[in-house]
Image (cartoon, helix red, strand yellow):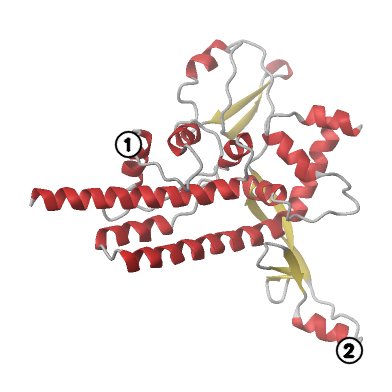
Amino acid sequence: MPYIDFKSVVKKVNLKPGGKKEIVLEVSDNGLDGKLDSLSEMIDCKVDVSMESLIVNYNVTINAKTNEPLKTYKVDDKGVVSEVKPQGEQIEADLGLPPEKVPIKEQTEQAELEVIDEFITSGMSPSYDDLPYDFQSIIKRKYEGETYMKMASELGISSGKIVELVDEYRKRVAPLAMKWNEWRQGKDKAETQSGKSEATDDNPQSDAKNVENDVDSEQDNDPQSRGESDDSDGPAASVDKEALEQFILSGQAPIFEDIPYDFPELLKRKLSGETWMQIANSLGTSSTKMQSAWSKYKKLVAEHMAKSNNGGEQGAA
């Protein structure tokens, strides 16, 4: 039985005669590479389709005077997100004064689904009395391949209801997830810069330094909102993204004892359409840990390539 899994953009929903609907999907990049034969076998066949938006739309309450969110958040060194009470509101509370009434408005924001789901599965997302479900487990099981229908049956609710509850929970924690993701990226960048400084002290080779600077500036969250997470190393002085990935895929990249993953094989899976979260779940680890190791691995491979290039040039001279 043919089976394919791919990501796309819904472009149109056309009403056809006889009550039929035509859905037009647009697939870019290599989303259907190696899958067209299976897709062609499905023409005129009945298929089971489920679609979930990779973008989460959520509302933020804004102070109409300052155009700033009424709620802001901070993250401690352990990744716990908490609300920051505005200074004026805190003074009013301390003095026992009634809170000032300010004009407000709702503003719609967007977030990548994967960022929110990573926040939920990290165990850092809060629980709410009116949403008494283990959403961390639900999201993890969904990425492991279980259906909403199966989980809904276990909870004694309909599949439509569980989807509604998950959607509501994602929207509610979205502002916290965005702040947590900002903290996570800053933490990773600081750690990478610290490692870069140490490497620069040990080996001030200009080419290796340039490679480090470019690899450090990457973010492994997908630049497409495209909804998919992907890496975006900026092209280095002597090693660009394509050359780096081709070298890794060639099997010539060195093995590093402190990197516990087979990244040449995992990169193949990533380029075939899997997300880092799906890959991490299949290995029983977190996507945050996986992406941190991937960044470190690419940096080490880039340094190896830069040193090899330098050695080749010196030998040629």
Q: Residue at x 68, y 56 (%)?
A: 177
Q: Residue at x 46, y 34 (%)?
A: 271
Which residue appears farthest toward the left when viewing the image? 317
Q: Residue at x 49, y 14 (%)?
A: 37
Q: CA distance from mark 1 to mark 2?
A: 68 Å
Residue behind mark 1: 252
Mark 2 secondary-structure assignment: helix
Residue 221 seen in this snapshot: no
Pointer 2 local density, CA inside 10 Å: few below 14, some 14–19, many at least 20: few
In which image quadrant can residue 80 be found? bottom right
Query: Please, what is the three-letter code of the amino acid marked with disc 1?
Result: Gln
Query: Please, what is the three-letter code of the amino acid marked with disc 2?
Result: Leu
Q: Which mark is residue 45?
A: none
Residue 48 position, x and y percent, is 69, 19
Residue 258 position, x and y percent, is 47, 48
Residue 173 seen in this snapshot: yes
**287 to the left or right of 138:** left
Q: State the residue in front, 153 or 93.
A: 153
Quadrant including the N terminus: top right
Q: Closer to the camera: disc 1 or disc 2? A: 1
**309 to the left or right of 177:** left
Q: State the residue in front, 39 or 285.
A: 285
Badge 1 or badge 2: first in the primary sequence? 2
**310 to the left or right of 82:** left
Q: Which mark is residue 95?
A: 2
**59 to the left or right of 43:** right
Q: Residue at x 67, y 31 (%)?
A: 51
Q: State the residue in front, 107 or 295.
A: 295
